[in-house]
Image: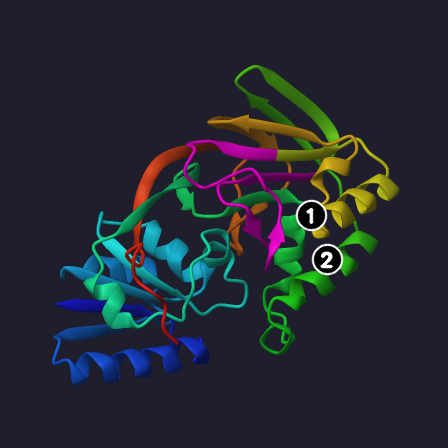
Amino acid sequence: MIEIIVNSRSKKSLIELDKIERVLQEKKLPYRVLKTSKNNNAESLMNKIRGDELIVIGGDGTINEVINNYHGKEIIYLAYGSGNDLARSIKFKKDVEISRLLDSKRFIEYDVGVVNDRKFCSGFDIGFNADIIKRTDGSRLKKYLGKYIYLLKGVIGILMLKKYKAKISWDDGEIDTDKLYLLNAMIQPYEGGGIKFAPDTTGQDGKLHVMIMENISLITFIYNYVCILFKKHNKLRKVKQITTDRLIIKTNQRYFQIDGELINSEEKLNLSCISKFYKLKRMEKNEKKFK
């Protein structure tokens, strides 16, 4: 039995579902569809998964929900969200015949990050990036601007830049500051609708790749963010960069973001990385891609 979890709020996801259903019906393959709703997100729908094959259609938020109730099955992930940062990070293309993905025996295992009891596939933020997500949530412009909504809200965020108190501890270091502007911890390279925050991570090294901007001027912060946008990470100034498997944060910011979703925060945040946690199906190496 092939089971499909689809984000029902996404028109693109529903269009893709219709295409997949036609293929499965032509091949007379048994399947069932589980659609997200106001009362049942993808995380709760995972309790109903019993089949041998799982297809997930949606964006970064949908795959995040699936991973937070993951049962160890290989997943065919088709990214149809506004950001699609996980798909961009793992260089996964949507232009592949679904039947070939179903037939493939190849899969790749990826790490996840954990903050307290919540898992994330791509990235975690407090400070500036979390404030962008807060401003983006509920914006009517999101459905028109797509991933560019993050850029617009980022510009607004710079004009209203906030600073936070934070005590940050890792293996062999500690920062205690009342001028934290950004803490970004990545599992994959991309987040924020295509911004490459961590060019050196692969999602398979068992580490958190952490960037901290604190106690710097507004001009330096803007300069650094422009460097990140244009992938000039070697030119960053006064930025602390850490590679670790554990991080402890105490902060007065009462929310954080993971995989594009805003989460209410506790005073103490424990971050870690779980190596090779979930499996995504890929094409066999000797197969070609088809439109």
Q: Is residue 6 left or right of residue 123?
A: left
Q: Is residue 49 visible?
A: no
Q: Which residue is depicted at the point 36% across and 34% down?
A: 275
User: Which amino acid type corresponds to the residue marked 2 in the rendered image?
Assistant: Gly
The residue indicated by pointer 1 is: 231
Indicate whether 131 appears above or below 41: above
Q: Which residue is depicted at the point 77% across and 49% down?
A: 226
The residue indicated by pointer 2 is: 154
Q: Is residue 51 left or right of residue 94?
A: left
Q: Which residue is depicted at the point 57% across and 22% down?
A: 169
Q: Would you say the residues marked 2 and 1 are in contact, meaning their CB atoms lie under 8 Å apart?
A: no
Percent of width and height locating residue 55:
28, 65
- Assign a secondary structure to mark 1: loop
Query: What stretch of residues is rendered in magenta?
Result: 182-210
Q: Quadrant of the N terminus?
A: bottom left
Q: Is residue 272 left or right of residue 285?
A: right
- Assign a secondary structure to mark 2: helix
Considering only order in the chain, which callout, 1 or 2, is on the residue closer to the N terminus? 2
Residue projecting furthest to the top: 172
Indicate whether 20 appears above or below 40: below
Q: Which mark is residue 279?
A: none
In the image, residue 197 lies in the stretch drawn in magenta: yes
Classify 10 Å Cα crowding around label 2: few (below 14), some (14-19), many (20 and above).
Answer: many
Q: How many circles with numbers are drawn on the protein?
A: 2
Q: Is residue 100 visible?
A: yes
